[in-house]
Amino acid sequence: MTKRIPSDTPATPPPASALTQAISCVSDYDPEALQVTHAQAIIRNCISPINAMEKVAIRSALDRVLATDIISPINVPAHDNSAMDGYAFHGEDLRAEGATVLEVIGTAHAGWAYEGTVGNGQAIRIMTGALMPVGLDTVIPQEFVSVIDHASDATSSKAITIAFGAVKAGANRRLAGEDLQVGAAALKKGRILRPADLGLLASLGIAEIPVQRRLRVAFFSTGDELRSVGEVLDPGCVYDSNRYTLYGMLTRLGCDIIDIGVVADDPAALEAAFINAAENADAIITSGGVSVGDADHTRQMMAKLGEVAFWKIGMRPGRPLAFGTINSSGKPAVFFGLPGNPVAVMVSFYFFARDALHHLMGAHPAPLPLMQVSSASAIRKKPGRTEYQRGILSRQTNGEWSVKPTGAQGSGILRSMAEANCMIVLAHNQSDVGIGDQVDVILFDGLI
């Protein structure tokens, strides 16, 4: 028998989306004037890493994201060994006062175990990396001893003299496992692998490792005025530079990229491009089409294809931004709609999309460090927005670092990004900067 629900019983509301939930957690949410930190928090809370991995040889693992912890199968080093070329002996043989004289009875080479017993009052010549013979615990560098040669017609022997206080017992011995112990985590999941990590993996005898599959990112530019490089530049048109900067930035992140090209300002063409991108990529990045004058048909289409929030960020450059998901056949792709001006595209990518894509690919990079330096020029700044100015960081004759803007900071002046070596970050509540004031900068090395 079917139970009848009274008409005055409220229907159960559908579960809130991740975007809606993230927005609800931000106090004083205002899409017309959203602070940079609030937008970054919303984006981060909406994204979950992709759940797909593959195994690769360590020589193919550079800049890939580690998919699991790597547990050391051995001690590193595997045995106690010498940290330098010198002489190994019992530390207890060092005299409490005066010089210590030891008889040299043999030599230990790296890669070979010393055969024999070294007693008290004796030492052996030892090479860097050679195993420490049983019982020996101290190595003195060869340059810190005096060698006495007792060669004669009948015998050939040597002794060394160690000056009082020249070395302490236990010095210059690498202990087994002091670098890494068996069973310890050598590298943590989410690490973006660097050259030193490849060497560490090789030192453990590991030939293959599990990494996250590469993130697939589709991107395109929108605008009837855009022309691709190689096309005729008609009157009123400009060459599309944004796809090339996006290509470079995504390549640096290690993404598999899908360049869809330039898409006309036409709802049908845009819809087809979005559907194509969502079916083939984990994330979609567009440039243009999110400003006030472009947003009407874009908003309608986004409502049809997914869930997207349009924001005006309290920042300069790059005020308009769209973020959400595009769905195609039930497969959601994270979406970033960046402004159309070239510098605004790069700044929006670096301070919003970059961290989100890292999170999506399962990476846990350290936050970009802020460096405080002296401003070499006055900078005008309105409180109430975050500003990212292109800067030139240089070292002064007194050895201290200072920074100055590259000049005009218009969001269409791409040349200034090429000239700059850092970004001057002026905080939301910060006001004008005077000559000599301290400002925060983020170096382009590590960012771009």
Image (cartoon, rainbow, N blue to C red):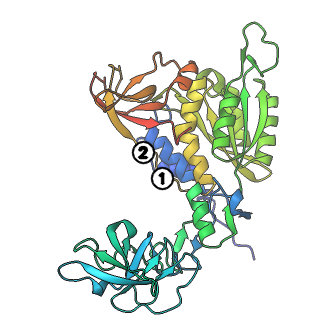
Q: Which residue is nearer to you in this view: 323 or 31?
A: 323
**Residue that sits furthest to the top in the current view:** 235
Q: Which residue is nearer to you in this view: 24 or 413?
A: 413
Q: Tell me, yes or no, whether the two marked residues, 1 and 2, touch with CB atoms within 8 Å.
A: yes
Q: Is residue 106 above or below residue 261?
A: below
Residue 207 in percent (x, y) is at 70, 69
Left or right, residue 412 beside residue 96: right
Residue depicted at 31% across the width and 32% down the height = 399
Left or right, residue 101 beside residue 272: left
* Tag of residue 214: none
Q: Which residue is mark 2?
A: 369
Left or right, residue 385 beside residue 224: left
Q: Which residue is mark 1?
A: 366
Residue 195 in percent (x, y) is at 59, 55
Q: Is residue 431 above or below residue 329?
A: above
From the image, which quarter does the C terminus lie in?
top right
Q: Let me know if residue 191 appears in the view.
A: no
| Amino acid at circle 1 | Ala
From the image, which quarter does the N terminus lie in?
bottom right
Mark 2 secondary-structure assignment: loop
Residue 148 in percent (x, y) is at 35, 76
Mark 1 secondary-structure assignment: loop
Residue 191 in percent (x, y) is at 56, 59
Q: Which residue is nearer to you in this view: 73 or 67?
A: 73
Q: Is residue 3 above or below residue 415?
A: below
